[in-house]
Amino acid sequence: MHEYSFELTTENWKARESARIKDGNVLVLLKVDKSERHLTFDYTIKGEVQVDCDNCLSRLQYPISDHVTLHIKLSDEEIEDEVDLIHLPSHTTQWDMTDHACDSVELSLPMKTVCSDSINREECDEEYIERMNARSDDEDTHHPEWDKLKDLFKQN
């Protein structure tokens, strides 16, 4: 059993050009159980990332905490990877798991991030939401260019 730790920082998120995570510091605590043709990566991710609120677009500090187990099979056969099983050539001596850890962080976020679940805000910016609602009420909902397309559907 081998133990490692590393941090996912600003450089990792910028390199990935993540659309969702703007910044963050996440600690990865990794335990590796190694056998002749099989590795088990058992790791915990814990920290905070910056994401935008899906309602009011405020920048949020969002807590991250998850536990992941990943199996790596060393084999010369060409086999398709599965969800928690990766196949690597048997002559592989190094593997960078940074991308996999970043993916785990992104997958640990809820589908919808809102202010009430964040560390730095309790409520959404009501003024912004009111302005967006007022703007959508003021817009003309009739667009003549779509009428031509609707006519095409009526013909068929």
Image (spheres, rainbow, N blue to C red):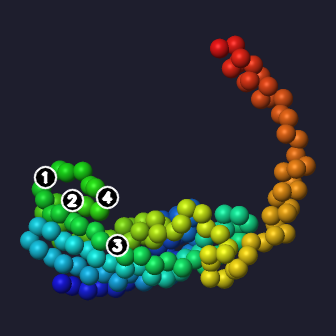
Q: Earlier in the sequence, mark 1 or mark 3?
A: 3
**Which residue corresponds to mark 3?**
68
Q: Nearer the viewer, mark 2 or mark 4?
A: 4
Q: Residue at x 18, y 84 (%)?
A: 1
Q: CA distance from mark 3 to mark 2?
A: 17 Å
Q: Which disc, if any, is residue 83?
A: 4
Nearer the N terminus, badge 4 or badge 3?
3
Q: Amino acid at mark 4?
A: Val
Question: SS class of the residue under badge 3?
Answer: strand
As helix, strand or loop, the secondary structure at mark 1 comes to loop
Identify residue for label 1.
Answer: 77
> Does the rendering let one see residue 71?
yes
Q: Say left or right for 77 vs 25.
A: left
> Is the Cβ of the residue at disc 1 closer than 8 Å to that at disc 2?
yes
**What residue would you read off at disc 2?**
87
| Residue type at numbered disc 3 | Val
